[in-house]
Image (cartoon, coloured by chain):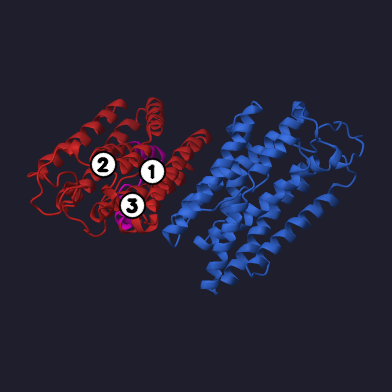
Chain colours: A blue, B red
Amino acid sequence: MNNGSSERMALSPTEPRHTALPRPGAPVTSAAPKIPTAALPDSGDALADPRYARFVTDLLGVIAYGELSGFERLSSDARFSPSLADRASLGRLAVQEFEHFELVGSFLGQLGVTVEDAMSPFQASIDAFHERTRPGDWYESLMKAYVIDAFSGDFYRSLAGHLDPRTREVIDTIDSGDGAAHLQRRLQEALANDPRLASRLALWGRRLVGEALTQAQRVGIEREYLAGLLFANEADHSEHTTALFSELTRNHSRRMSALGLTA
Amino acid sequence: MNNGSSERMALSPTEPRHTALPRPGAPVTSAAPKIPTAALPDSGDALADPRYARFVTDLLGVIAYGELSGFERLSSDARFSPSLADRASLGRLAVQEFEHFELVGSFLGQLGVTVEDAMSPFQASIDAFHERTRPGDWYESLMKAYVIDAFSGDFYRSLAGHLDPRTREVIDTIDSGDGAAHLQRRLQEALANDPRLASRLALWGRRLVGEALTQAQRVGIEREYLAGLLFANEADHSEHTTALFSELTRNHSRRMSALGLTA
């Protein structure tokens, strides 16, 4: 198989277009007061702030391109499934990703931005992520979908709490709960049928989450892109970023344990 | 690009399971009277006839696998599109094929047959068709979708008139009018932008329809599969078969002309 697999991952823009973007409603000066998160982005007008809208556009561009490329890779990998039933199931998951892509695209349209324009700055970076994480066979493709979709979902959800309600609603909607459950069941079944898979998939899972964390951290710390969104008003970005990444890693470990694998 | 493209083509079963299958309601003896086609399959009970139901199951199995494999190939080829907008459009067409697959699968389920069981006899043959018609680039992939989807659509529609109303309804629903119009527009645009494409795509179109006709004729004449359905009660199968293939070829020529290409 020469394709990658499903994911909504890969967060770095090809250009460091943003540093320390403000949360909606937060003053853009560096003297911004520390405001409790929960009190922040409830205003429906958040998107009227051009810098905030620009940030949301970029975030949704990343998500949209992740979904589109995930759709293409998962549906092409589906062809190598061991059974026709698996091909159909993976096809269904892929179609779900395309529907997410269309949903995000339609929201971007409401913001006056084409989905193509929003996605294009992130294309090279996400493509490179896929190249670094090409599955060696169908089971690795399944595992990639399982690990990366969940990681990305956690990541986006962790941002959603800091976003305006409309954007948050879009991000909530693209959460693929059923898909994750199906992938987990199918991987458990595969591991039960072929115990030799376990060590290979455990290794592959570690590699995948490593790449995902690298991608996220590059953005989050070096470029201050993530920190700029989440913690623009806080003295110490890195503490929060570290806490977020610890949580992402813990969740990943839990998911690996659910498969009987060591993270 | 190492993939084929969208289609619902490829009609031959891997095994010659059927010869001269009866139309619904037609006696299974060879002494069947000649009955005008239009008067035939209006009974809602047609599918209660096990031989007819078996034929419908096979036909829908072919269609379902054509749609599923077309979905996978078109969505993987989408990745090589010249623009993000093209990727999205091709993705949308691919998703439409998956929806057709699911529709056919759900109808098969009503007949008490899993879509996997219905598809499996045709998998090798359709895969071989895809191998023989691998597009060399994105434009050839677009052309393959344009030529083969339309050819298959014509072919299935020509059968539909001879089928019972429920099956006919399913076949009518999977007709992808919008998709074909989009493909035609996009190919016209590509040809206008790069006139050197014309000779290559004209050649490719001839090759595609040749493969499609070969596939259909092998079934229709050598195996008497098609003839057995359509013209079981008629003295001369070959005449009708020839007329059908002439029509398929004429329609193809018209579609090539619409692109300014010689068929």
User: Looking at the image, do the residues carrying marks 1 and 2 touch, with CB atoms under 8 Å apart?
Assistant: no
Between disc 1 and disc 2, whose residue precedes? 1
| Cα–Cα span, label 1 and label 3 | 16 Å
> Residue at coordinates 17% horizontally, 38% vertically from top-left?
B37
Circles 3 and 2 on the same subunit = yes
Helix, strand or loop status at disc 3: helix
Helix, strand or loop status at disc 2: helix
Name the residue type under label 1: Ser
Residue closer to the observer: B114 or B217: B114
> Residue at coordinates 72% horizontally, 47% vertically from top-left?
A157
For residue A88, side relative to residue B157 (left or right) = right
Helix, strand or loop status at disc 1: loop
Residues in magenta? B122-146
Mark 2 belongs to chain:
B
Give the mark toward the camera: 1 or 2: 1
For residue A85, side relative to residue A27 (left or right) = left
Mark 1 belongs to chain:
B
Q: What is the x, y in percent for residue A253?
A: 70, 63
Q: What is the number of the mark on residue B6?
A: 1
Asked if residue B256 lies in the magenta stretch, the reply is no
Q: What is the x, y in percent for residue B171?
A: 33, 41
Residue closer to the observer: A80 or B95: B95
The residue under label 3 is: B61
Q: Image quadrant of residue A171? A: top right
> Residue at coordinates 85% horizontally, 33% vertically from top-left?
A26
Q: Residues within 10 Å of mark 1 (few under 14, many from 20)?
A: many
Name the residue type under label 3: Gly
The residue under label 2 is: B207
Mark 3 belongs to chain:
B
| Cα–Cα span, label 1 and label 2 | 16 Å
